[in-house]
Structure formats: C-alpha cells, structure tokens
Amino acid sequence: MAQILYLNVGKPEYKTWKGKKEQSAIGKKGVKHAFLKKDSFDGDGVAATEYHGGPDRAVCFYPIEHYQQWSAEFNKNIEPPTFGENISVTGMKETDVYIGDIFRLGEATIQVSQGRIPCSKISKNNDIDPLLKRVVQTGFTGYFFRVLEEGMVYEDSNITLLERKQEHFSILQANQTFFHRKDDFDAIETLIGIEALAGAWKKELKKLLMQKS
C-alpha cells in the first residue's frame, strides 16, 4: 500500500508548440478529489484518442522515479505531471507491475491493462525533441488502468495491490515485446493470451503474428 502523490485531471485545450497550435489534454492540473468512472475521472479528457481514452485507458499512471532520470539525462528540471498522468506513486515502475494487476485506488478498483504508447506531445510539452525516442527505447512509458469498480479518489488516497493475475509479463516486459521484439512470436502469443491485456494491444500484436511465416 502507498499513498498517491497527486491527482490530476484536465480537458483538451489548445497549446502552442514551436509556433504551431495543437489540441492536447497533457496539461493536467491537480485537484482535491475526482469521481472515477468507467471511462475516466470526472473533469478529465483526451485529444489523441488513438493513444488515450476509453475503458481500457481510463487512468494514466507515470512513475515518479523517471522524472529524476530524465531531468539528469537532459540537464533540465522536469516536474510532474508534465507527462499528462492522472496519478503517480513511488515504487510502481514498469518493472514492478504486471498486466492484469488489480489495485484499490481510494474508493475505486482498477486493473493494469496496457503500457502507454507515447506520442510526440511528450517531447513537445517538455521541449525536448529526443525525449519520445528515449521513452520508447527504455520502455519507461507509464501505463494505463481500466476501472473495475467506480468510486471517489482523493489527492491523498492510497493505492493497494489486491490481486496479481500473472507473472509472465510486467509492463516493462510487455513494452519490450511490443516495441522491440516484434519477431518474437512465442512471446507475442503469450502476451496476447493474457485475458486482461487491452483490446487495442491485442489487435496490434495479432497483426505482427500475421507476418509469421
């Protein structure tokens, strides 16, 4: 059990990056509490629906530990929640959680569904062009939860692991397969077989299997 460090929500808005206007919900703001529904927190939204939003991506998590790494690597102070996450906590990096893990978050129950597929807005929002590439290379993408039971979440709510469904694929292992081991068909088949894996990931992984001779 751990106490979350913050709770952030935000609707899409127009941002100007390098002179170009784009719509994004990456600029989330801290709130005292928010009701967590099946699709999202009240007051939360997405712009890039291909990467965010929907029942399998209702809650976005980014490990707090990565902020220190990126700040050191790029010699720039990077502070949360600049990756657009709703929540974070210490001790829940991609290597520490597994697809299907079920957690109690405040009064809600949530389940790890997939790693985040990052988009270019991560680089744009932090004004670091190589950041997206490094996030994909390392697998330090953060991840998403689906909502099994709706409920109120507070800025100081606890998050508690209730059940671990499998130990074959952590988020980091799943990310490595998804991004970097696209010809490891045995691993892909095993990953697809995890019931809790998000449908969007299963769809993309099945496309890779079609390339199998």
Image: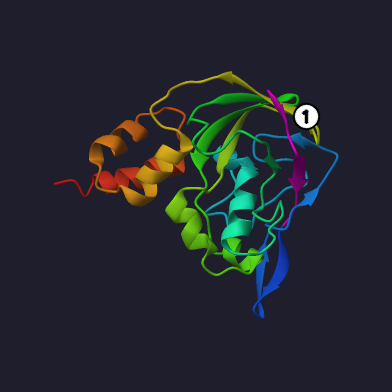
At x 52%, y 55%, the residue is 118
Residue 103 on the magenta span:
no
Residue 62 appears in the figure: no
Q: How many marks?
A: 1
Amino acid identity at mark 1: Ser
Q: Which residues are magenta?
A: 1-11
Q: In this picture, is 67 found above or below 2?
A: below
Residue 184 appears in the figure: yes
Q: In this picture, is 24 found above or below 88?
A: below
Question: In which image quadrant can residue 157 be found?
Answer: top right
In the picture of the structure, the residue carrying the numbered disc 1 is 157
At x 81%, y 32%, the residue is 156
For label 1, count other residues whose C-alpha is less than 10 Å away and answer few (under 14), some (14-19) or many (20+): some
Q: Secondary structure at mark 1?
A: loop
> In this view, which residue lies farthest toward the top?
163
- Could you say where residue 133 lies in the image, as x and y percent from the top left? 47, 61
- Could you say where residue 71 lies in the image, as x and y percent from the top left? 63, 58
- Could you say where residue 113 lies in the image, as x and y percent from the top left? 51, 35
Asked whether 23 or 71 is in front, the reply is 71
Compared across the picture, whether 48 is left or right of 11 comes to: left
Compared across the picture, whether 43 is left or right of 48 comes to: right
Asked whether 196 or 85 is in front, the reply is 85
Compared across the picture, whether 125 is left or right of 112 comes to: right
Question: In which image quadrant can residue 6 be found?
Answer: top right
Compared across the picture, whether 27 is left or right of 198 comes to: right
Asked whether 186 or 209 is in front, the reply is 186
> In this view, which residue lies farthest toward the right?
32
Asked whether 85 or 24 is in front, the reply is 85
At x 28%, y 48%, the residue is 208
- Could you say where residue 55 lies in the image, as x and y percent from the top left? 58, 38
Quarter of the N terminus within the rendering: top right
